[in-house]
Amino acid sequence: MKTRTIRQVVTFRATPTEVYQTLMTSRGHAGFTGASARVSPRVGGKFMAWGGYIHGTNLTLVPGRTIIQAWRPSDPTWPEDYYSKVRFDLRVTRGGTRLTFTHSGVPSEHVGHLATGWKHSYWDPLRKYFAKKPS
């Protein structure tokens, strides 16, 4: 199977801790996506997002800095029992947080829709979510 890597850099008007907590709590994740989510705060813990469409396991967690997860969608065209890897690196930048995102091991045929999906399903809603939060 041929795989590729998606790399994206986005900024948010929130602290790295706020971004981390929003991604890594069930309430925060559901709050910006509008879909059910269950997120374990522990390494080795499981997560589920978008009403069960996405799921996986937390591999590395450094609060306020780094999230690395084994990741897969519930998509019949995704290879059975195969997990890609997502990495969120959070750093302070002027006016908020710079998130460097890497999604590696993505089956080549899924790169296009997933690259667009991260923007529309994660980065845009996160920006709106933080814009509504009081400073």
Image (tube, helix red, strand yellow):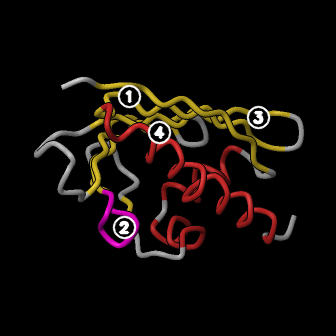
- Quadrant for the C terminus, please: bottom right
Mark 1 secondary-structure assignment:
strand
Magenta region, residue range: 48-54
Binning the other alpha carbons within 10 Å of mark 2 as few (below 14), some (14 to 19) or many (20 upward) gives: many
User: In the rendered image, which residue does mark 3 sit on?
Assistant: 92
Q: Tell me which residue sits at (81%, 44%) in the image.
A: 96
Q: Which circle marks residue 104 in the picture? A: 1
The answer to if 111 sits in the magenta stretch is no
Q: Earlier in the sequence, mark 1 or mark 3?
A: 3
User: In the rendered image, which residue does mark 4 sit on?
Assistant: 67
Binning the other alpha carbons within 10 Å of mark 4 as few (below 14), some (14 to 19) or many (20 upward) gives: many
- Quadrant for the N terminus, please: top left
> Residue 9, percent across and down?
66, 33
Q: Distance between the residues labelled 2 and 4?
A: 16 Å
Q: How far apart are marks 3 and 4 (CA)?
A: 15 Å
Mark 2 secondary-structure assignment:
strand
Q: Is residue 80 left or right of residue 93?
A: left
Binning the other alpha carbons within 10 Å of mark 1 as few (below 14), some (14 to 19) or many (20 upward) gives: some
Q: How far apart are marks 3 and 2 (CA)?
A: 27 Å
> Residue 99, percent across and down?
65, 37
Q: Quadrant of residue 59?
A: top left
Q: What residue type is labelled 1?
A: Ser
Q: Which of marks 4 and 1 is nearer the N terminus?
A: 4
Q: Which circle marks residue 126 in the picture? A: none
Q: How far apart are marks 4 and 1 (CA)?
A: 14 Å
Q: Tell me which residue sits at (84%, 70%) in the image.
A: 134
Q: Which of marks 3 and 2 is nearer the N terminus?
A: 2
> Residue 16, percent across and down?
68, 43
Q: Tell me which residue sits at (67%, 54%) in the image.
A: 18
Q: What residue type is labelled 2?
A: Arg
Instruction: Tell which of 29 and 54 is nearer to you.
Output: 54
User: In the rendered image, which residue does mark 2 sit on?
Assistant: 38
